[in-house]
């Protein structure tokens, strides 16, 4: 009986050690997977390309799955080879068509994984050939092309499971054999030397099986270590800063990229906590960042995301895309640990601002274009209506501009438009607005006028400014004049579009009467200059 107990104890210890070793390997793989899920984001095209390269060329089976429907959105070539379907066929399927387990069995495995605090699941997947494999599935959510998908790595553990099952079956048979031998000794006083030899032989076979399992685990561990290194290289190549926050204490762990993004070394900004991290954030962005963090802590959002400005060591502000997710909660659901990334989006922000500027400002003169001018005109009318104040709309057209293009070329014509635009701005007050309506036509909005004569004075001043010679290349110069039409709010109209049309009509009347004149809507008089009493 003592020999039996010793035998079972030795084999049990060996299997327990093997189980702990394999669990560590699985956890290492999960950590690597989590890094991909948290760092690969489509915020930038370069990141998308790096992810696609790793995804399509990797030997591990990888799937992108819609968590709501189970639709396989994207599969890599390794998945095609493993399941025996083409990539296009896989991307027409749902994961339920591959999973051989029933929905009830899938739910039971999910509950078991949660109870055992596992971050991976054991499923049975069916290939195109009909063969069923035991697989370990590690999944994390990720934002890909604006959608939240499950990024899954599938590992075939059929052989490992068969080895484990065979080993435990072998142990059970071993115990049964030992019991039979002991019973036989008791009944027939069988030689203890034979029993001892049998036990030693069985132990040798058991130890050999354990060594084989450990060797397989060692190979798998090396492969996972290599995979983690590749994932770290992906993080490095995408220039992403990572952070991990222990929520109860507020302690924040960052990588070197996080610090370098702000011009610091890692030693200069550590130790870092929630309060000191907030000191880096622009005051206008801090409140929204904290509010989104609280919403994620309370479970109202699947993840945390915020665009914010962080103070650089040199004093300037760096725009970053901050992403994060709570990865550990206590039994009551309170958040314990959160991980996330920082990505520098300053260039994207700059490009976005430039596009906004181009959408609202004339490319040649940098004056507000027609769209922005009308927008500001509408706002000015609202203010004037509230304050019962006077506005003047001036429509300016250049006389003789076509001859400049014909005689000196379009580059000289562009220079003339730029000079005239600057002269108009110099002639106006700071509260007035000048825009380019197109071609050689300009619009001017005069606000906060005390009397109509103020608009006439400014119109005469602009005509004088336009008449001044404009130096061109090769010691040449161009001289032209301007015709201006004027309409007043609320005397002539109360809508911006109507006032522009009336001023345009008055400008044409002034142009027909002679060059370099201005005219007020509704009158038949044109002026070249303004004098009191006109």
Image (tube, rainbow, N blue to C red):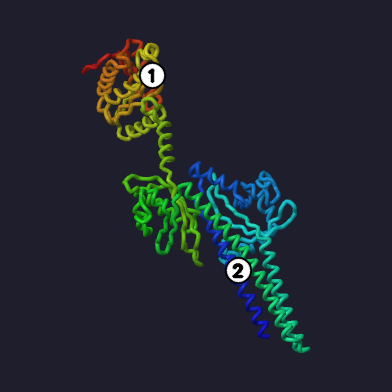
Where does the image place residue 71, in percent across and percent down from the top left? 64, 49
- Select label 2 or label 1 by which is in front: 2
Q: Tell whether 86 sits left or right of 428.
A: right
Q: Nearer the viewer, residue 82 or 499?
A: 82
Picture disc at residue 19: 2
Quadrant of the image occupied by residue 352 = top left
Q: Residue at x 62, y 55 (%)?
A: 154
Quadrant of the image occupied by residue 219 = bottom right
Q: CA distance from mark 2 to mark 1?
A: 79 Å
Disc 1 crowd rating (10 Å Cα; few below 14, some 14-19, many 20+) is: few
Q: Earlier in the sequence, mark 2 or mark 1?
A: 2
Q: Is residue 35 above or below residue 478?
A: below
Picture disc at residue 206: none
Determine whether the residue tagged by mark 1 lies in a helix, strand or loop: helix
Where does the image place residue 242, in percent across and percent down from the top left? 45, 53
Q: Is residue 57 above or below residue 380?
A: below
Q: Residue at x 67, y 64 (%)?
A: 161
Q: Tell whether 290 sits left or right of 81.
A: left
Q: Residue at x 57, y 62 (%)?
A: 25
Q: Is residue 435 visible?
A: yes
Q: Is residue 359 above or below residue 142?
A: above
Picture disc at residue 411: 1
Determine whether the residue tagged by mark 2 lies in a helix, strand or loop: helix
Assign the C terminus to one quadrant of the image.
top left
Quadrant of the image occupied by residue 466 = top left
Where does the image place residue 453, in percent across and percent down from the top left? 25, 22
Assign the N terminus to one quadrant of the image.
bottom right
Where does the image place residue 483, in percent across and percent down from the top left? 33, 16
Disc 2 crowd rating (10 Å Cα; few below 14, some 14-19, many 20+) is: some
Q: Nearer the viewer, residue 182 or 493?
A: 182
Q: Is residue 495 visible?
A: no
């Amino acid at each position: 009986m003592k020999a039996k107990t010793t035998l079972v104890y030795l084999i049990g210890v060996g299997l327990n050690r093997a189980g702990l070793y394999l669990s560590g390997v699985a956890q290492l793989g999960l950590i690597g997977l989590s890094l991909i899920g948290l760092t690969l984001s489509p915020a930038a095209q370069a990141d998308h390309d790096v992810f696609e390269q790793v995804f399509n060329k990797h030997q591990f089976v990888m799937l992108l799955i819609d968590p709501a429907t189970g639709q396989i959105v994207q599969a890599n070539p390794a998945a095609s080879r493993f399941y025996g379907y083409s990539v296009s066929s896989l991307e027409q399927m749902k994961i339920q068509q591959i999973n051989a387990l029933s929905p009830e069995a899938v739910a039971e495995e999910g509950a078991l994984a949660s109870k055992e605090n596992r971050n991976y699941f054991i499923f049975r997947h069916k290939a195109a050939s009909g063969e069923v494999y035991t697989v370990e599935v590690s999944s994390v959510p990720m934002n890909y092309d604006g959608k939240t998908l499950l990024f899954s790595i599938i590992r075939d553990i059929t052989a490992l499971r068969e080895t484990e099952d065979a080993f435990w079956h072998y142990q059970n048979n071993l115990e049964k054999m030992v019991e039979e031998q002991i019973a036989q000794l008791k009944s027939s006083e069988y030689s203890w030397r034979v029993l001892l030899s049998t036990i030693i032989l069985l132990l040798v076979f058991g130890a050999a099986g354990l060594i084989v399992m450990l060797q397989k685990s060692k190979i798998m561990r090396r492969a996972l270590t290599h995979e983690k290194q590749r994932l770290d290289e992906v993080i490095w190549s995408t220039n992403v800063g990572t952070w991990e926050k222990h929520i109860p204490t507020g302690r924040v762990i960052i990588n070197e990229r996080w610090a370098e993004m702000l011009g610091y070394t890692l030693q200069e900004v550590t130790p870092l906590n929630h309060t000191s991290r907030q000191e880096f954030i622009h005051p206008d962005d801090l409140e929204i960042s904290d509010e989104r963090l609280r919403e994620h802590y309370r479970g109202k959002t699947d993840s945390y995301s915020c665009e914010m400005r962080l103070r650089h060591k040199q004093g300037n502000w760096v725009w970053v895309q901050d992403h994060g997710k709570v990865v550990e909660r206590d039994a009551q659901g309170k958040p314990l640990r959160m991980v996330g990334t920082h990505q520098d989006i300053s260039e994207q922000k700059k490009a976005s601002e430039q596009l906004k500027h181009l959408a609202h400002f004339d490319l040649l003169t940098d004056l507000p274009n027609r769209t922005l001018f009308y927008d500001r005109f509408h706002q000015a009318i609202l203010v004037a209506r509230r304050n019962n104040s006077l506005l003047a709309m001036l429509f300016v057209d250049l006389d003789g501009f076509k001859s400049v293009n014909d005689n000196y070329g379009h580059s000289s014509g562009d220079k003339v438009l730029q000079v005239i635009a600057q002269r108009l701005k110099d002639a106006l007050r700071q509260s007035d607005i000048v825009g380019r309506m197109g071609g050689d036509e300009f619009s001017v909005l005069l606000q906060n006028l005390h009397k109509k004569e103020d608009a006439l004075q400014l119109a005469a001043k602009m005509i004088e400014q336009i008449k001044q010679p404009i130096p061109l290349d090769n010691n040449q110069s161009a001289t032209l004049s301007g015709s201006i039409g004027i309409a007043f709010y609320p005397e002539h109209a109360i809508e911006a579009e109507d006032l522009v049309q009336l001023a345009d009509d008055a400008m044409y009347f002034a142009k027909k009467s002679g060059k370099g004149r201005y005219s007020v809507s509704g009158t038949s008089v044109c002026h070249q200059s303004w004098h009191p009493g006109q």
